[in-house]
Image: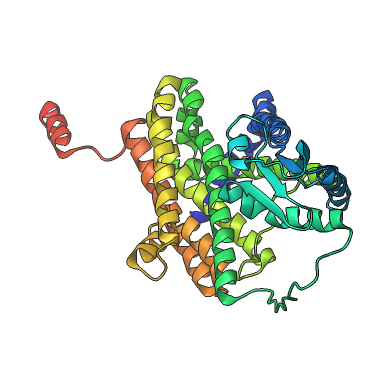
Amino acid sequence: MLSHRLHAAWVVARRDFVAVIFSKAFIFFLLGPLFPVIVGMMAGSIGATVQRDLDRPVIGVAMPAHEGDLMVVARDAVARQLDGRVPELVVLKRLRDGEAFDARVALGSGQGVAAIITGTRAAPVLTGTPERIDQWQGIVGLIAARAVEKAPQGYPIVQVAEVKTSVAKQRNEQVLTAQAGQVLLFLLTMLLAGMVLSNLVEEKANKIIEVLAASIPMDALFLGKLFAMLAVSMVGIAVWGSGYGLLVLVGQKSAPLLAAPAVGWPMFLALGFAYFAMAYLLLGSMFLAIGGLATTVREVQTLSMPATMLQLIVFFFASYALARPGTWIETASRVFPVSSPYAMLASAAQSSALAPHLVALAWQALWVGLMVRFGSQLFRRTVMKSGPARPRKAKRRKAVAA
């Protein structure tokens, strides 16, 4: 009996998988996420260029005679050494002997400079806002030393002792890895699980679902469709991942480096795929039951908003539990089936223990089976109008027969 159900589920899964993969709509589905990515990359590049063009700070120089010109020349030499990461220097005024210059007044008079250097090359004075002074004090000192052509003597040599990392720093970095894993898992699940909502609408409209329901058990039908959509999602992830890898190979910027998770990157990635599959199957089983109750595409669109809100609530709950280690909130997020994949993936980034993941995957698989069973029975009773009759209707049939 079990082998018959599994064979029926395999037939349905293969049928749906082939139908989706070789359809024209699937091509546009694969290309869909690329458009916002391309637009985002272009917008980020343009925004960075604009920000770089706008954020070109200029420091004014007001020094006696030609000392300001020597500061400008020294700035150009320092900029070549530091690859241009030095603010521009502009001579505002060449002071005569005994001439005074009020830098504060000049800054408020619309000179177009962010700070002003006064004094002499040997004793420069930087006038500006506190953040500008903290940012440029060292650079101005370096430029002044270069302009004097001899570094000033008497500065103490600061001895340093460096450490690569600490326990607290490593823990914080692993928390960032856990957060990144949760965000990626949420984005993929939200993007791909919505396909299940509209899976049964077309077949219900064409009466195909009635033929399938008469041929195979309803839970096998649901299970087959669910795994077919999971396989389609894996194909989409493979295509998108390959596209990203190609962009990295041709010289585009890669994602920021994250700290190595506690279980190691190979195991973390394997657990990531396993928990994505479980998160997809858990949400997909609920969405399949909800989509089975809808009769039109309009109803599916109406139901998509509550489904999206459900995913957001689950993600926020798991993210909140990440900041509460060792509390009942973290335990609840791991036990609650829908949030369990997110919480356990975050745990893989912070703890090297593997036994809890085996228990969690078995627990999640159990709930997938229960949800598929419940969804198929709900679909049969409410849509197919089959199942055990109610006692009142049975009494009425007996009365009519008598």
Picture residue at 43% right of the left edge, 26% below the top: 300
- Looking at the image, can residue 242 be seen? no
Residue at the image position 69 percent from the left and 64 percent from the top: 266
Question: Who is closer to the viewer here, 149 or 100?
Answer: 100
Looking at the rendering, which quadrant does residue 389 occupy?
top left
Question: For the point 35% across and 68% down, which residue is it?
Answer: 327
Against 24, is 265 above or below?
Answer: below
Quarter of the picture containing the C terminus is top left
Horizontal arrangement in the rendering, residue 207 relative to residue 164 (left or right): left
Residue 184 picture location, percent across and down: 58, 49
Measuring from the top left, give residue 199's x and y in whole percent: 51, 31
Q: What kind of colouring is applied to the model shown?
A: rainbow
Q: Position of residue 41 (x, y in %)?
A: 70, 34
Residue at the far front in the pictured view: 98
Report the front residue among 175 and 125: 125
Residue 349's quadrant in the figure? bottom right
Q: Quadrant of residue 258?
A: bottom right
Residue 387 lies, with reference to residue 314, above or below; the image says above
Q: Give the percent coordinates (x, y) of residue 194.
A: 50, 35
Question: Looking at the image, which residue is at 38% across and 66% down?
Answer: 331
Q: Is residue 118 left or right of residue 335?
A: right
Q: Tell me if residue 58 can be seen.
A: yes
